[in-house]
Image (spheres, rainbow, N blue to C red):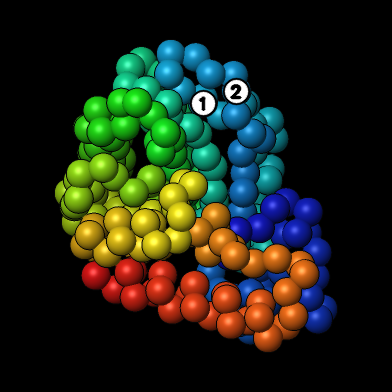
Amino acid sequence: SFLFEDTMDRQIEGRDTADYLWNVKQIVPFLKVDKGLAEEKDGAQVMKPIPGLDDLLARARDKGVFGTKMRSVIKLPGAGLDEGVAQQFEVGKQILAAGLIPIIEPEVDIHSPQKAGAEDQLKAALLAGLDALDQGQSVMLKLTLPSTDNLYRELVDHPKVVRVVALSGGYDRDEACDKLAANQGVIASFSRALTEGLTAQQSDEEFNATLDAAITAIAKASAT
């Protein structure tokens, strides 16, 4: 479950949110640490600076948070892509030093006119970043479903990768599930595809049935 800083600071039934999620609900808590995206440059949007990150990470660790989430966006192959990945790993090492597991998330825009080329470059950059981590360090990767099936299999099997999870990125649920099923070892971390078809106007029964169908389809696609 992804938490914002103010949510992390709240309590549920007298327990810190992260503590409640893990110890009561068995849901792994992650904290969103980025401050949004910078303006696009060289085909990518890197993260804005994250002031006070060390203090935030120390509080998160003390409150029982497991890991962090931070997102950058890639539109095209090129220098911006490499800069974005380097920044993700630089901040990732800071997060690892604080005792948390970072999710490295350089999202490739599904509408990129050079999506496959960007993904080839991204894979090489991620492998280089992983190989530069210290022995015993590991990260999660959250990536756009690739245009080439099983492109990221080396990342799935990498000893420094805890898990590769897929973001739906704007694909509709059926297409996202089809793509996910075609990528062995990758599991879903969908938000946009998960909430597709849900509206505040639905009855409880309609809402629950729609959500249940979505979870069932996504879980099945994750099982490959």
* Tag 1–tag 2 contact (CB < 8 Å): yes
> Is 187 situated left or right of 154 in this image?
right
In the image, residue 14 sits, relative to residue 197, either above or below, namely below
Q: Name the residue tied to disc 1.
A: 46
Q: Name the residue tied to disc 2.
A: 38
Residue 186, position in %: x, y? Answer: 30, 60
Residue, x 80% and y 64% (percent of image)?
A: 10
Residue, x 35% and y 26% (percent of image)?
A: 113
Q: Is residue 208 among what the camera can see?
A: yes
Q: Is residue 180 among what the camera can see?
A: no
Q: Count residues near mark 1 (Cα–Cα under 10 Å), then give few for <14, some for 14-19, many for 20+.
A: many
* Residue type at the position of mark 1: Val
* Residue type at the position of mark 2: Ala
Residue, x 50% and y 34% (percent of image)?
A: 72
Residue 209, position in %: x, y? Answer: 58, 82
Where is residue 48, by image quadrant? top right
Residue 30, position in %: x, y? Answer: 57, 58
In the image, residue 71 sits, relative to residue 32, either above or below, namely above
Distance from Cα at disc 1 to Cα at disc 2: 6 Å
Along the line of sight, the residue nearer the viewer: 101 or 141 = 141
Give the mark, 1 or 2, whose residue is nearer the N terminus: 2
In the image, residue 5 sits, relative to residue 39, either above or below, namely below
> Is 151 situated left or right of 192 in this image?
left
> Is 192 situated left or right of 175 in this image?
right
Element at label 2: loop
> Is 42 situated left or right of 11 in this image?
left
State the mark number for residue 81. Answer: none
Q: Quadrant of the N terminus?
A: bottom right
Residue, x 81% and y 81% (percent of image)?
A: 13
